[in-house]
């Protein structure tokens, strides 16, 4: 494992990480889970930073939270994560939060891509969530706000979602609300770094909580925060750092 990785209880279900203490999960690749990628199972405050949570499925119970599910009475802070290609509700078609199911929390500089199944949302919000500098790309729905919930958003970039928002909750969109292709380096190959000329570069709002991107690069690199999990580098994209990969094939370090 990387020296920056903090890992708590891992279940026997492929890549699933079930957390029952107040954890910090950093710089992991979580993939191939059949109970979702991360499940915060009790009323705790969790932090997820710099993770790639991709290609997980939520196959059982309600089918909620394909990538990440947080206990209704818990909360989570997500900083500079990529949540991509997750599915939920393959058993129960009413499942919610293909990417993330969250009651309360704060999300800063995250990227949600191609999450589907159930309501197909990148994020399903249950109570009160704040988002800054978020990319929603290719999801069935970007944000699904449950009845009575409140979502505060700024620094948002939407592209190629079936719907950007849905639900009976209240969604407040900030002044930075962009609908343009983020020009990922190679979305088809899962490379969600910002390519040259991306409208997400220097377009974000100030987010001091996110001082590093998903690879540990300092933010902001130039005049302002970029939108999404990766900060574009003036000298070109650096080589990918070490990540600890959790998958149905086991645990291993990749570079």
Image (spheres, helix red, strand yellow):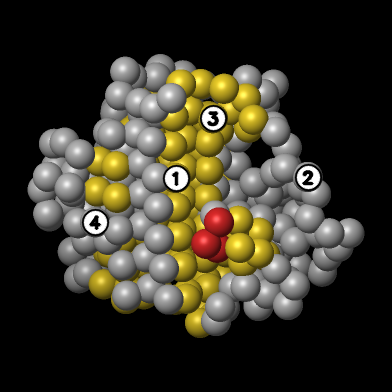
Crowd band around label 3 with a 10 angstrom C-alpha radius: few (<14), some (14–19), many (20+): many
Report whether 202 appears left or right of 253.
right
* Separation (CA) of disc 3 from disc 4: 24 Å
Residue 19 visible in image? no
Crowd band around label 2 with a 10 angstrom C-alpha radius: few (<14), some (14–19), many (20+): few
Q: Position of residue 125 (x, y in %)?
A: 30, 56
* Separation (CA) of disc 2 from disc 3: 17 Å
Q: Which mark is residue 54?
A: 1
Report whether 203 appears left or right of 10.
right
Q: Earlier in the sequence, mark 2 or mark 1?
A: 1
Q: Position of residue 50 (x, y in %)?
A: 60, 42
Identify the residue position indicated by label 4 in the image: 117
* Separation (CA) of disc 4 from disc 1: 14 Å
Identify the residue position indicated by label 3 in the image: 245
* Separation (CA) of disc 3 from disc 1: 11 Å
> Please, is residue 16 above or below residue 99 in the view?
above
* Separation (CA) of disc 2 from disc 1: 20 Å
Secondary structure at badge 2 equals: loop
Crowd band around label 4 with a 10 angstrom C-alpha radius: few (<14), some (14–19), many (20+): many
Q: Earlier in the sequence, mark 4 or mark 1?
A: 1
Q: Position of residue 79 (x, y in %)?
A: 57, 47
Q: Residue at x 27, y 33 (%)?
A: 35
Q: Residue at x 31, y 67 (%)?
A: 140
Callout 2–callout 1 Cβ contact below 8 Å: no
Callout 2–callout 3 Cβ contact below 8 Å: no
Identify the residue position indicated by label 2 in the image: 239
Q: Earlier in the sequence, mark 3 or mark 1?
A: 1
Secondary structure at badge 4 equals: loop
Secondary structure at badge 3 equals: strand
């Amino acid at each position: 494992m990387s020296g920056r990785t903090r890992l708590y209880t891992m279940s026997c279900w492929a890549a699933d990480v079930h957390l029952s203490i107040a954890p910090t999960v950093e710089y992991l690749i979580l993939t191939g889970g059949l109970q979702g990628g991360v499940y915060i199972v009790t009323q705790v405050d969790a932090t997820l930073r710099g993770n790639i949570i991709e290609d997980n499925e939520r196959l059982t119970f309600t089918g909620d939270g394909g990538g990440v599910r947080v206990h209704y009475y818990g909360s989570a802070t997500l900083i500079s994560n990529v949540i991509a290609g997750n599915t939920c509700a393959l058993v129960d078609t009413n499942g919610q939060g293909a990417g993330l199911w969250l009651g309360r929390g704060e999300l800063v500089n995250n990227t949600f891509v191609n999450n589907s199944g159930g309501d197909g949302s990148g994020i399903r919000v249950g109570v009160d969530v704040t988002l800054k500098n978020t990319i929603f790309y290719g999801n069935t729905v970007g944000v699904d706000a449950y009845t009575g919930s409140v979502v505060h958003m700024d620094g948002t970039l939407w592209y190629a979602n079936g719907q950007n928002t849905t639900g009976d909750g209240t969604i407040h969109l900030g002044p930075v609300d962009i609908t343009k292709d983020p020009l990922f380096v190679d979305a088809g190959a899962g490379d969600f770094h910002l390519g040259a000329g991306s409208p997400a570069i220097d377009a974000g709002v100030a987010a001091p909580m996110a001082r590093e991107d998903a690879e540990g690069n300092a933010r902001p690199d130039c005049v302002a925060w970029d939108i999404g999990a990766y900060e574009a580098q003036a000298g070109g994209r650096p080589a990918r750092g070490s990540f600890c990969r959790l998958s149905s094939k086991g645990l291993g370090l990749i570079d």
